[in-house]
Image: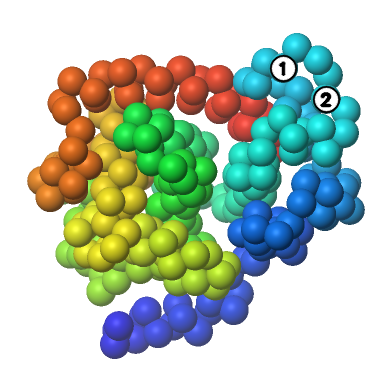
Amino acid sequence: MKDPKIKRVIGKVKDLPTLPRTVLRITELVNDPKSSAKDLARVITDDQVLTARLLKLVNSSFYGFPQKISTVTGAIVLLGFDAIRNLLLTTSVFGLFSKKVKTDIFRMELFWDHSLGCAIGAKVIGDYMRYDKVEELFVSGLLHDIGKIVELLFLPEDFGKVISTAREKDILMAEAESRVLDYTHAQLGEMLAEKWNMSSKLVNVIAHHHQPALAGRFSKEAAIVHLADILCRAMDIGSGGDNKIPRLNNDAWNSLQLKISSIEPIAEELERQFKDISLFITTEM
Ligand SMILES: [Fe+2]
Ligand SMILES: [Fe+2]
């Protein structure tokens, strides 16, 4: 990364938004096998906005619990640690960036739909494959293209060039980046994930979602996000900034060991879950 521009970006990393402290603390607790529901409840209840958001979410029709859930501990017991972390992370990340970004060359709401669609898609594929950490897949899908937002915020001229090249030549944004820039949104996303102290799995999946084989021991997870990305584009769920459907990487597909006939039930489940949750999350911001 010798390009002066990427150096400039690295220089600006300190200005990248930080996740709210509470969300970081929750991530730590979720990763700590010794932590209890009580510890987690204490951190959440200290933050009134998060508490209100969480209770609203668990009482939404998405979860469809017959009784009203009025305490944070109740929500944790019913949904589990990981699910709680995801909900809070999703609403925090969306909230964090949505206020800052105002642009007419890029439709933010479609970008968030794309991110949420990939998050749900990755989780649905994981469930289908009986992968045991589907909640991590959700977070990976949610953040896979976050580098595009970093590009938009910190290198708006480059971002404009990429968007116009992608449109003029009818190519993917990732391809336009490689033609007009010396860096990609995947590299920028990797930087942000590192800054947020995300796990090395997450950092690698974000960095290599367009070439899953390069993610080393996390190439299977990267392949899942890669497939979720393509599915969302094929199904017209949101937009990642261009209207292209990338080719499914052969090695990635083989590593998943899925049958082609499994795509249809996965797509149906993705569509169902997306409809349920997107209504709720987008009206939340
Ligand atoms: Fe991407
Ligand atoms: Fe994407």
Disc 2 + disc 1, Cβ < 8 Å: yes
Residue denoted by label 1: 65
Disc 2 packing (10 Å; few <14; some 14–19; many ≥20): some
Residue 59, placed above or below residue 112: above
Tell which of 185 and 210 is nearer to you.
Answer: 210
Q: Is residue 285 left or right of residue 121?
A: right
Q: Is residue 151 visible?
A: no
Circle 1: residue type: Phe
Q: Secondary structure at mark 1?
A: loop
Circle 2: residue type: Ile
Residue denoted by label 2: 69
Q: Position of residue 78 (x, y in %)?
A: 72, 30
Residue 92, placed above or below residue 268: below
Within the image, what quadrant is residue 119 found in? top left
Q: Is residue 85 left or right of residue 39?
A: left
The numbered disc on residue 242 is none
Tell which of 201 and 108 is nearer to you.
Answer: 201
Q: Position of residue 24 (x, y in %)?
A: 68, 62
Tell which of 243 and 250 is nearer to you.
Answer: 250
Q: Position of residue 269 (x, y in %)?
A: 40, 20
Q: Position of residue 2 (x, y in %)?
A: 29, 87
Q: Is residue 242 left or right of residue 284?
A: left
Q: Quadrant of the N terminus?
A: bottom left
